[in-house]
Amino acid sequence: MIDAPIISTRNLSVSFGGLKAVDDVTLDIERGRITSVIGPNGAGKSTLFNLVSGALAPSSGRIVLEGADVTGLPTRKLQARGLARSFQITNLFPGSTVFENLRLAAHILEPGLRGFLPVSSSPSTLARVESLLSQFDLESVAGDRAGHLSHGEQRRLEIAVALACEPKILMLDEPTQGMSHVDTQETSALIRKLAESLTVVIVEHDIDLVMDLSDCVVVLAQGRVLAQGTPAQIKGNVEVQTAYLGGH
Amino acid sequence: MPDPMVAAEATQGAVSARGAHLSLSRVAIERENDEQRVVGRLAAVFFLAALLFAIYGWLQGDTFFMRLATEALIYAGLALSVDLLLGYGGLLSLGHALFFGLGAYVSALILKDVAPSFWLALAGGTLVGLLAGVVGGIIAIRARGVYFALITFGMAQVVAKIIYNTQELGASDGIIGIPIVPIRLGIADIMSDDPFSFFILVLVIIAAIYVFLSYATRTPYGRVLSAIRVNEGRLPFLGYSPAYTKLGAFVISSMIAGLCGSLYPMLRGFVSPELMYFEVSTNAVIAVVIGGAGTLVGPLYGAMALVFGKSVVGSYTEHHLIVIGVFFMASVIFLPQGFAGFIKDRFIGSQDGRS
């Protein structure tokens, strides 16, 4: 392996009460790849996501981002280091328009003093918003309130908002959750396209999607890493089959 | 066989739809501008009406209503400061009388004991609002929702009681005999007891606060503050700090409350602990709610309605609070967005209908 991993966890654990939700997880996420985390319900996928994105503090273990120990850093500091995430349940500003949601997110890249100038005065922010609108096919609803969008459009906006800060690592929590088959296909193509320029980490239930999309698959069960490898390796792994894939 | 006319129309439709797509974020901006235009017109009507009222009052040689209107303007400024927190940040302060009252006391003390200087008193009131805002903000913004409201309420009650029991500050009597101050404006000197001139001066100050706040809420920081009201939890994932944003808004808000408070003793010639009481805080909140939270212009109208409503109803019955209470309930039930919110929705709504 030539490239150092962009993000690593070392013996990461967190407990809720007596339950070890994430138990001694050591992982290396490679730069520029699509890594998927799968596992049965309650395997600790979302908890692992929350730990890595700074939403939760680990009980023990370390998180290393581009060689720097970032364990316990607040979310917005991680964001400033290039880590962005989306949410499983669309988590936006429903009363604001699609455009305003994106503008708010895109503005973070402006220097601090620009925060005191009128909100629509930055050409670079507006350009970023325009390009996200077209990239995610949201132009026709730019002036609609985010809460009025269809489910598929909201899911797309959710990813677009996470991307607005031009992150190095994009973490997607069940990006196609509740989407129609066609929408899922389109989102999958979109993620593949995004992965050309950044590192993508996905938590996803849709096994077919994961196997189709990922460069690397991590299987969690009961908070532990059960297996990791290419989709082909995971498909052939007997342990994974018994624990998770069942009859597949 | 395809109809050539239909085909041509379809092509044309597609072209214009593509043209529309290219400018859709412009459309989104224009929608914001439409809202601002409606609010701006309401503000223009307000300040113009105030000016006409002042001229009419001046021609009539009126003192009572002019002074009442000046007082209403001062409370309108307090309502503006409450609206920044409530209407934008979603933070219900039940203790803004604290900053208002501190501004009034500091202004009174400066005018009486230091120097009869309008500008010094104004600066002193603003500064004490700022300092108290930093301290109060650090304490209060940790809490959310009803706990934030209770902490602000508690802080105001504590300080009001301390002043109520401090002989040096006149205790329950407050400070009376505040001298009339000459106000040097460069172009003209006016006296604070001249009802017309002082009204105009206060009007200009409130207008300046209004312009400042409506600008500030349209900056990216203002938008982050609004985003806190809707979904505070998402902001750190976008790289923003809700805590610093809330603290900043709290300090600006209490500074404005202190500034408005410093005008009070110049108008009435006294200050008393009642200025820090719960009723002053809640009246500001009521003005915001009936006027339309998050519009800035609404609270201006709300404060007028409240102060004049009280005075008019109060001249018929001493139970005027019952009438005000019923009026407040009716307004919340029938105009949940407040007066300005109602006007805004109507206007923007009819525009949508046209397009």
Image (cartoon, coloured by chain):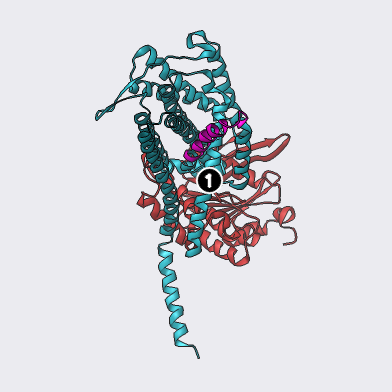
Chain colours: A red, B cyan
Span colored in magenta: B300-320
Compared with B14, A111 (above or below) is: above
* Number of on-image labels: 1
Camera-nearest residue between A234 and A80:
A80
Rendering quarter of residue A217: bottom right
Q: Is residue A110 magenta?
A: no
Q: Residues within 10 Å of mark 1 (few under 14, many from 20)?
A: many
Q: Main secondary structure of the magenta part?
A: helix
The amino acid on which the numbered mark 1 sits, given as a three-letter code, is Phe
Compared with A92, B246 (above or below) is: above
Q: Chain of mark 1?
A: B
Q: Specify the farthest residue to the left.
A: B187
Left or right, B155 with respect to A131, comes to: right
Q: Residue at x 60, y 35 (%)?
A: B324
Picture coordinates of residue A157, whole percent (x, y): 53, 55
Q: Quadrant of the C terminus of chain A?
A: bottom right
Residue where numbered disc 1 is placed: B339
Q: Specify the farthest residue to the top.
A: B167
Q: Secondary structure at mark 1?
A: helix
Q: Is residue B12 visible?
A: yes
Picture coordinates of residue A2, whole percent (x, y): 46, 49
Picture coordinates of residue B141, whole percent (x, y): 54, 30
Q: Residue at x 55, y 61 (%)?
A: A187
Q: Is residue A58 visible?
A: no
Left or right, A248 with respect to B287, comes to: right
Camera-nearest residue between B201 and B210:
B201
Rendering quarter of residue B20: bottom left
